[in-house]
Image (cartoon, helix red, strand yellow):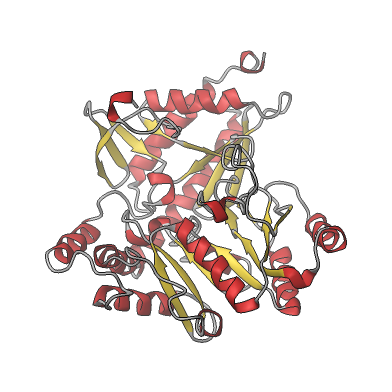
Amino acid sequence: MDKHYNVTDAFTMVHPLTLVKGENAKVWDDNDQCYIDFVGGIGVLNFGHCHPHIVNAIVNQAQSLIHYAYNAAAHKPYQTFMTRLCALVPMIGELAGMLTNCGAEATENAIKIARLKTKRAGVIAFDGGFHGRTLAAVNLNGKVAPYKRGLGTLAGGVYHIPFPSADNGISDQQAIDALERLFLVETDVDNIGAVIVEPVQGEGGFQLMSPTFAQYLRAFCDEHGILLIMDEIQSGYGRTGTPFAFTHLGIEPDLLLLGKSIAGGLPLGAVIGKAEVINGLPKGSLGGTYSGNPVACAAANATLDIMQEDEIWQSAKHYAETIEQTIAQWQEEGVSPWLFGLTGIGAMRGIELRHPKYGVHPSVMTRVLSEARARGLLLMPSGQHRHIIRLLPPLTIEPETLQEGLTILKEVLKALPNEDLVA
């Protein structure tokens, strides 16, 4: 971005573009160049750009009440949405929650709730995890660069252990051993108030937590009075092909964090939890001026309407099957030695770029992003070594648009040289 726009140069732009319009799975820049969008605002647009039902809800709400701070006086969009959302979340018992401005703010409030409820400050997080860029949330991230570099001492009491997954080769036992070591060497278990984890890591490379370890973790938290926080800011709202990814693990969290696609593109997040956990806190300890803005809540209610439609789940199923079949076919054809395979589950899939001889190399992703963009496809990197393409097109993507985008990606991968990238 040019300096005369007066935007800080601390941002890193994946794509040097200025977008002016979006429609479902396509966007246009200020030169009227069209791109197929496999980024989706980094997971914010599971139901596409400018979905008509969401747009209508925004316009209608903006004509009646644009804003009121819920701490000052209640408004109907907030109340309606919270009731509907709690009814949708598949957790046993009475639920309650609060709305926030974004996912990072949901993380911050969940940590506050855990501290207030358990009277313990310690938190266990996972290598490769991502929970936000605000100062408390950033220390939960399982990666130093670029999120923690140069920040100095961060909030204490955060401990990281390996994330066990079939996608990264880390076993359940390795994670269990690391947890046991933590309480032998680092801290007493009675200091830990919460464990926070993504059921499917987003920034970490679309890796599904081992279901057997998740069940071990649930039992461990129950035994020691620790709250289990599931961060579904990216994996929720249908991204995995089901409304919430934690259902793939066979457990329930105590607190559930939501954001990104929750309001079809408007800023909104949520903390949903068991009523006995999220209620009974000091008055005034939670809230925020813009949290649960009426227009964002109207968009969120419209998003829930879309989630009630069978068509969206059929589309998600078709998308997931297409990705699985296509990548398997590419591997059979030997499209590229860099094509290692898929990570993730259902409709939340990553493509790992790993050469059998040269392994992982950062320049490969740089070339893939650039070449795909030049051909009209926007992609997003992820993974500890920036070696996994995270696929985030809307679940509503038209089959022909999906195929067109995959064809572009195939040509880009075919064009990758075998050796000169790693010379």
Q: Looking at the image, can residue 405 be seen?
A: yes
Residue 274: x %, y % from top left? 53, 80
Left or right for 135, reference 179: left
Left or right for 399, reference 222: left
Residue 238: x %, y % from top left? 44, 61
Give the quarter of the image for residue 84.
bottom left
Q: Nearer the viewer, residue 178 or 66?
A: 66
Query: Which residue lies at the image location 33% right of the left edge and 65% below the top edge?
Result: 289
Q: Nearer the viewer, residue 69 or 271?
A: 69
Above or below 317: residue 271: below
Residue 24: x %, y % from top left? 29, 47
Q: Looking at the image, can residue 253 be seen?
A: no
Above or below 419: residue 170: below
Q: In the displayed image of the protein, which residue is found farthest to the right?
A: 184
Above or below 417: residue 373: below
Query: Which residue lies at the image location 48% right of the left edge and 55% below the top edge?
Result: 234
Query: Which residue lies at the image location 42% right of the left edge and 30% below the top edge?
Result: 9
Residue 99: x %, y % from top left? 39, 68
Left or right for 265, reference 144: left
Q: Nearer the viewer, residue 245 or 299?
A: 299
Question: Which image quadrant: the C terminus?
Answer: top right
Query: Which residue lies at the image location 34% right of the left edge and 40% below the top edge?
Result: 401
Q: Nearer the viewer, residue 387 or 353?
A: 387
Q: In the displayed image of the protein, which residue is found farthest to the left?
A: 63
